[in-house]
Amino acid sequence: MDKEEGSIKFTQPVMLQSFKDEFDLDNQRETSTPAEPGSTLPKVPKDAKVDEKEQTYFRSGVGKLLHMVRWSRLEVYNAVHNLSRHMKASISVHVKAMHQVMKYCVSTPNRGWKLKPNRT
């Protein structure tokens, strides 16, 4: 909150910390974009799905990212939307893409919605 400017900024630092704590982001390289430019997530072949534990991990991560999009990080909308299309079944490429979005959010902690009411 900036009282002099009369604004408040939503950045969700607790959610960013949960990304660090709950998801394997240490193995991910630094990224300046939420998704690989020009890439699309492939459809899931019938015989290549991740196991149920990994699918639950993926759903949990995408759910947290959807919360981030809704309340503070609109710039990752397209990447998260594409991930959410694979909530029923995913493959390791989808999990890697989820990690990239999370790593991007963690590496840009000061981004968020800034609200500044106009009091007239």
Image (tube, rainbow, N blue to C red):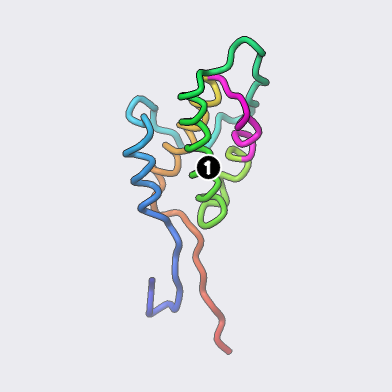
Residue 11 magenta: no
Residue 80 in picture, x, y percent from top left: 58, 39
**Which SS does the magenta portion mostly show?**
loop
Residue holding disc 1:
63
Residue 17 in picture, x, y percent from top left: 34, 46
Q: From what the image shows, is residue 44 above or below residue 102?
A: above
Q: Residue at x 57, y 54 (%)?
A: 70
Residue 48 is left or right of residue 5, and the answer is right
Q: Residue at x 55, y 25 (%)?
A: 94
User: Which residue is nearer to you in this view: 86 or 31?
Assistant: 86
User: Which residue is nearer to you in this view: 19 or 120?
Assistant: 19
Amino acid residing under circle 1: Gly
In the picture as drawn, the residue positioned furthest to the bottom comes out as 120
Quarter containing the C terminus: bottom right
SS for dot 1: helix
Quarter containing the N terminus: bottom left
Which span of residues is magenta-colored?
81-91
Residue 23 in picture, x, y percent from top left: 38, 33
Name the image quarter holding residue 31. Answer: top left
Residue 33 is left or right of residue 28, and the answer is right
User: Which residue is nearer to you in this view: 120 or 101?
Assistant: 101
